[in-house]
Amino acid sequence: MTHLILTDVAASISELKANPMKVVASGEGMPIAVLSRNKPAFYCVPAKAYEAMIDLIEDKELLAIARSRSDEEDIKVNLDDL
């Protein structure tokens, strides 16, 4: 059976246990698939990559809020009244 691996670098759990920082460094800042019995068990994500992912998620959520508010009725304003 084949498994989708969503990274360029993969390592076994044994490699991760033996030298975690070497495995993380091998990804050169990108996530690493950690395999258990040749199946992806989890992804090891460096802090900077994780922070970037969280920023993208927050941006997407803010964009959805902005788009939903842009569908609301327009309010006409006279600049002289401000």
Image: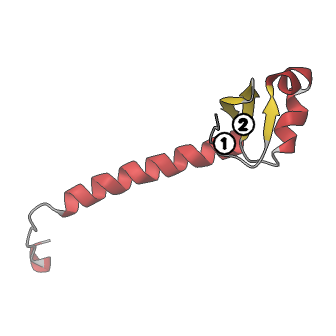
In the image: residue 64, left or right of residue 2 = left
Q: Position of residue 2 (x, y in %)?
A: 65, 38
In the image: residue 28, left or right of residue 55 = right
Callout 2: 10 Å neighbours few (<14), some, many (20+)?
A: many
Q: Regarding mark 1 in the picture, which secondary structure is present there?
A: loop
C-alpha separation, residue under disc 1 versus residue under disc 2: 7 Å
Q: Regarding mark 2 in the picture, which secondary structure is present there?
A: strand
The answer to which of marks 1 and 2 sits earlier in the sequence is 1
Residue at 66 percent across and 42 percent down: it is 5
Label tally: 2
The three-letter code of the residue at mark 2 reads Ala
Placement of 35 over or under 17, stated as above or below: below
Placement of 61 over or under 12, stated as above or below: below
In the image: residue 56, left or right of residue 60 = right
Tell me where residue 54 sits by quadrant.
top right
According to the picture, the residue beneath numbered tag 2 turns out to be 33
Callout 1: 10 Å neighbours few (<14), some, many (20+)?
A: some
Residue at 63 percent across and 37 percent down: it is 3
Q: Position of residue 62 (x, y in %)?
A: 37, 52
Placement of 16 over or under 57, stated as above or below: above
In the picture as drawn, the residue positioned furthest to the front comes out as: 1
In the foreground, 79 or 33: 33
Instruction: State the mark number for residue 5.
Output: 1
Question: Quadrant where the N terminus lies?
Answer: top right
Question: Quadrant where the C terminus lies?
Answer: bottom left
Instruction: State the mark number for residue 42.
Output: none
Q: Position of residue 27 (x, y in %)?
A: 81, 45
| Residues at marks 1 and 2 touching, judged by CB atoms closer than 8 Å | yes
Colouring mode (rainbow / by chain / secondary structure / one colour): secondary structure
Between circles 1 and 2, the one closer to the viewer is 1
Tell me where residue 12 sits by quadrant.
top right
The three-letter code of the residue at mark 1 reads Ile
